[in-house]
Image (spheres, rainbow, N blue to C red):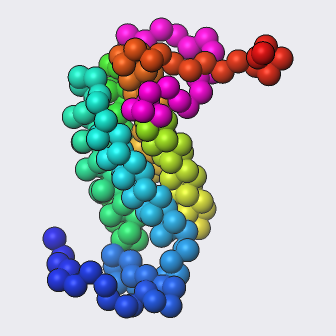
Amino acid sequence: MGNRLSKIYTRTGDKGSTGLGDGSRVDKDDLRVEAYGTVDELNSTIGLLLAAELPGGIRPVLERTQHELFDLGGELCIPGTVLIPGSYVDGLEADLDRLNENLPPLKDFILPGGSDATARCHLARTICRRAERRVVSLARDETVNEATIRYLNRLSDFLFVVARVIARSDGDGEVLWVHGDQRL
């Protein structure tokens, strides 16, 4: 671990710039800062999800995911650093397959709602999609680890499946979309 902060505020960002992990300074709305800031937002939202009641087997995977997202944020904060191995993607795929195995096939679109925990999971999923978009935007201008984009893409799929699992386990069920001409 590098430097420890003994003082939280530094005043160095008061004019709209921030320091990256390599010591360089960029604008606070730089694509890189947008990318790792959105990953941080995603991680916080998963923390909010973890504060809810969850079915067995989900909590440890989400806790592991928070650590992996912290790695991902660090990777994005330090240009040229690679902290996300392909094995992180493989792990998500294995968890996704395990959880999806017992779910019925999708026949309808699912609305992002239901119980408190299900809604929190859908919120995390949509923030994950935004994080992925931010990283893809960054990758147009700078080199980004391919596994990072794959990880975020797979994580949003995983969160969708987790939302389905939660909805079915908490008794509220999935909220299905009804086409406009079929709604009352």
The furthest residue to the right = 181
Q: Quadrant of residue 83?
A: bottom left
Q: In which quarter of the image is the C terminus?
A: top right
Q: Is residue 75 among what the camera can see?
A: yes
Q: Quadrant of residue 90?
A: top left
| Residue drawn at x 43%, y 62% as measured from the top left | 36
* Residue 6, magenta (yes or no): no
| Residue drawn at x 43%, y 82% as measured from the top left | 18
Q: Quadrant of the N terminus?
A: bottom left
Compare residues 138 and 49 and report the one nearer the observer.
49
Compare residues 13 and 138 and report the one nearer the observer.
13
* Residue 104, magenta (yes or no): yes
Q: In which quarter of the image is residue 54?
A: top left
Compare residues 90 and 119 and report the one nearer the observer.
119
| Residue drawn at x 52%, y 10% as measured from the top left | 105
Relative side of 14 to 95, left or right? right
Which residues, given as a range, are shown in magenta?
100-119
Find residue 61 and report its horizontal and vertical position in percent.
26, 34
| Residue drawn at x 43%, y 12% as measured from the top left | 103
Relative side of 178 to 43, left or right? right
Q: Is residue 165 among what the camera can see?
A: no
Find residue 82 and report its horizontal and vertical position in percent.
33, 60
| Position of 56 relative to 44 (above/below) | above
| Position of 24 relative to 71 (above/below) | below
Please tell me whether the stretch drawn in magenta is mainly helix, strand or loop.
Answer: loop
| Position of 91 relative to 65 (above/below) | above
